[in-house]
Image (tube, helix red, strand yellow):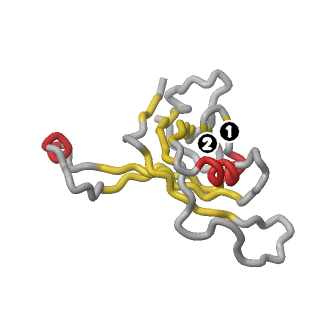
Amino acid sequence: MAALGTRALVLRIGSTDYSDAVSDVRVKSDEDDADFVSFAAAAAGGARKYILALTLVQDTAATSLWYFMWDSAGTTQTVEVWPNGRPISGTATATQPKVTCSAVVSEPNGDLLGGEADKSTTARFTTECEWELTAKPTLAIS
């Protein structure tokens, strides 16, 4: 069994690793409130929607995840979440699985820039956002 840890997660968008820019990454599932539910979806328990929830550091550098969100809002991007780290080979294994999804990048419904003052010299402003996924993510274990 590959129980998931809390320190090794890798977040990749396209071919870029943004792990150093995030402190919280979640793939969430919820009931879909669509007006149309097919018989197949109803038989499977109801339609679902999937979301990639992120907490990321605010950083206006052109190579940062925050700037990527700012500049790419409205586009669909391929996202990989490696909950137990990414092997050098880039191939998922039973102990280092990979979740892949297509996410529609969007700005947050809330704080986009700025935050509260803090006396710490290492504290950073963060932004929380949720990107809707176009379908259920896929899980690769080998």
Residue at the location (78% across, 67% down)? Answer: 123
Task: Give the residue at mark 2.
Answer: 11
Q: Does residue 113 appear left or right of residue 73 in this picture? A: right
Residue at the location (68% across, 25% down)? Answer: 88
Mark 2: which secondary structure? strand
- Packing grade of label 2 (10 A; few <14, some 14-19, many >=20) is many
User: Image quadrant of residue 138?
Assistant: top left
Q: Does residue 118 appear left or right of residue 29 in this picture? A: right
- Residue 48's x, y, as percent? 30, 50
- Of residues 63 and 8, the one drawn nearer to the viewer in this rendering: 63
Comes first in the chain, label 1 or label 2? 2
Mark 1: which secondary structure? strand
- Residue 135's x, y, as percent? 38, 41
- Of residues 1 and 102, the one drawn nearer to the viewer in this rendering: 102
Q: Which mark is residue 110?
A: none
Task: Using the image, determine if residue 119 lies above or below residue 94.
Answer: below
**Quick check: marks 1 and 2 in contact, CB under 8 Å?**
yes
- Residue 47's x, y, as percent? 25, 49
Task: Give the residue at mark 1.
Answer: 17
Marks 1 and 2 sit apart, C-alpha to C-alpha, by 6 Å
Amino acid marked by disc 1: Asp
Task: Using the image, determine if residue 122 lies above or below residue 118.
Answer: above
